[in-house]
């Protein structure tokens, strides 16, 4: 009787472990954030009084593991780049007279959750997105955008720091 109880307990333990072992065997390893993402995250946080030059923004993107592609966009160079709980699909920088911005497109990120994390609660009525996009005026020069994407566009959310004079 004791052997039956021990055998039954082992069988139940093995059955319970099977789904976990199966999930672990098929899990996709999350992208590991390169050390350079901290600077990029700081630029995207769009803090009052912050600024950047085109060269500084490009350096931050490259330090994060993104390479400049023809056409001026930046994409992961060799491995996925983790940022804000997702992975970067591409990014771009625009520094022109009257405005500068840094824009990062992400997969695996819920735009509503990301907006809530940064206390960006105002729905952007002008955004042409299916799901709500959000905007927060940090000060008279800085605006933080959290934009909803979709599968058709190739990203789930985007973050943009826009600075105007």
Image (cartoon, grey):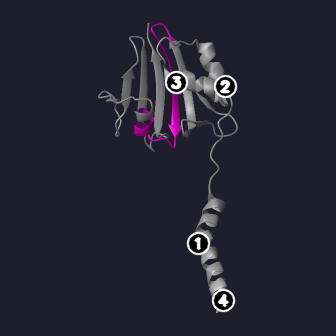
Residue 158 picture location, percent across and down: 47, 32
* Precedes in sequence: disc 3 or disc 1: 1
Residue 100 sits inside the magenta stretch:
yes
Left or right: 121 with respect to 83? left
State which mark lies toward you, 4 or 3: 4
State which mark lies toward you, 2 or 3: 3
Q: Classify mark 4: residues with Cα within 10 Å, few (<14), some (14-19) or many (20+).
A: few
Q: Are marks 4 and 3 in contact (CB under 8 Å)?
A: no
Q: Which mark is residue 62?
A: 2
Q: Residue at x 64, y 89 (%)?
A: 4
| Residue in the foreground of this view, choosing between 69 and 16 | 16
**Magenta-drawn segment:** 96-115
* Precedes in sequence: disc 2 or disc 1: 1
Label 2, label 3: how many angstroms apart (C-alpha)? 15 Å
91 lies above or below 97? below
Q: Which mark is residue 16?
A: 1
State which mark lies toward you, 1 or 4: 4
Q: Which mark is residue 44?
A: 3
* Precedes in sequence: disc 4 or disc 3: 4
Label 2, label 1: how many angstroms apart (C-alpha)? 45 Å
Q: Residue at x 55, y 28 (%)?
A: 91
Farthest front residue in view: 2
Q: Secondary structure at mark 3?
A: helix
- Indicate the quadrant where residue 31 lies: top right
44 lies above or below 86? above
Count of marks, rendered view? 4
Q: Which residue is mark 4?
A: 2
- Answer whether residue 24 is visible to the viewer in this image: yes
Q: Secondary structure at mark 4?
A: helix
């Amino acid at each position: 009787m004791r052997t039956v109880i021990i055998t039954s307990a082992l069988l139940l333990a093995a059955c319970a472990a099977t789904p976990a072992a199966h999930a672990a065997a098929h899990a996709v390893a999350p992208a590991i954030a390169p050390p350079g993402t901290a600077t990029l995250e700081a630029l995207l946080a769009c803090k009052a009084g912050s600024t950047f030059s085109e060269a500084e923004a490009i350096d931050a993107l490259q330090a994060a593991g993104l390479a400049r592609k023809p056409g001026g966009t930046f994409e992961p160079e060799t491995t996925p780049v983790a940022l804000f709980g997702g992975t970067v699909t591409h990014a771009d920088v625009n520094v022109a007279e009257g405005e500068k911005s840094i824009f990062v497109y992400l997969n695996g990120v819920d735009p509503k959750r990301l907006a809530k994390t940064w206390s960006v609660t105002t729905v952007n009525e002008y955004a042409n997105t299916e799901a709500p996009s959000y905007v927060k005026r940090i000060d008279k020069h800085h605006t933080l955008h959290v934009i909803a994407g979709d599968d058709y566009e190739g990203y789930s959310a985007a973050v943009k720091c826009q600075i105007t004079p």
